[in-house]
Structure formats: C-alpha cells, structure tokens
Amino acid sequence: MKNFLTLLVFLFLLVSCNLASGSYPYAERYNINLPEIELAYKIENFKNNNPEYIVPVELGLEDGRRTEIEHWYHIYFNVPEKNKIFLTWVRKKSKTETTFAFVSVQNYSGLGNWKLINKDYKKPENKKVIKEFEENILSKLDIDKFIQK
C-alpha cells in the first residue's frame, strides 16, 4: 500500500510539473539556411523599410543582446494591425545556419503580460498566433527560400 501511494504521488507530481528544460523551451523555431549576420541584416533592412514594425521607443523594448556574452539576439516586432508585439530571437546554429525563434506575444491592452507561444495559449489560439507571425513577419522577410522545412 505504501509503494502504491508513493507511485501515485510521483505520477501526480510528474504530470503536474512543467518539464520543459533550457532557455526558451516553448519557442516556435525555424531553421534558416543563412549565417546569423545575414539573417539579422535582412530583419534590420525589413524594419527600416517598414517602420510600422518598429516598436515605439517609449515602450523600452530594444532589439539586441542583453549582455555581451548572450547567445540570443532579441528582436521585437510591432504588429499594429493586430495590436500586438512579437518577441523573437536569432541565434547562430553553424556558420551557414541560424535559428529564428518566435517566443512570445504581448497585446497592446496588456502591456507587461507576455504570453509564451506553445505554452500560454490553448491549441487553436496557439495555431492562430503562430499563423499570424508567419503571415505578418516571417513571410515578409524575403527568406522563404532559406527556411529549412
């Protein structure tokens, strides 16, 4: 009986725990067949040519690495027609490949309340938000031919 209770408690803890590990475990990742610097340039060029995607300065959300040794280069996209801000990052995978990740979303009405992709949304809404990202950002970066499926 004692073993059964121990097993039951263990299973309950296992099922109720969030078992994702590492930094950004829920991010929606895209493998891009471009060096990190080229992808970053394409993103910067896109934002310069489409200033509506630049997050207003007063929000304090700046693109870049948070420290000199950090692996992730964070990029924020303003999506005014959806009243949202998307947080993404790029990270070198190899000399010729980069990971581009969609991390979270913040609605204008809930500034400060980031919702993680693949965690904080129910499945249908999560798919919808990922599709919004792919249509409003990913497809407009001129990198379609570099995305590894």
Image (cartoon, grey):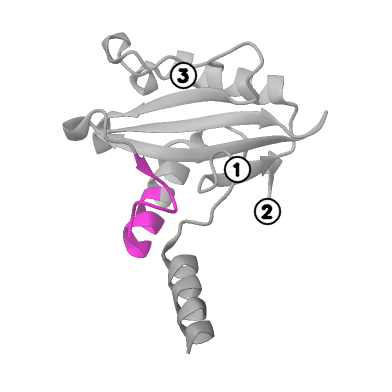
For residue 15, above or below residue 105: below
The residue drawn where x is 60% and y is 42% is 22
Q: Which residue is mark 2?
A: 149
List x then y, in percent, for residue 109.
16, 33
Residue type at numbered disc 2? Lys
Q: Which residue is mark 3?
A: 47
Residue type at numbered disc 3? Lys
Q: Is residue 117 magenta?
A: yes
Q: CA distance from mark 2 to mark 1?
A: 23 Å
The stretch in magenta equals: 115-129
List x then y, in percent, for residue 54.
38, 18
Q: Which residue is mark 1?
A: 22
Residue that extends furthest to the right in the rendered view of this protein: 95
The residue drawn where x is 50% and y is 34% is 140
Mark 3 lies on a secondary structure that is helix
Tag 2 and tag 3, C-beta contact below 8 Å: no
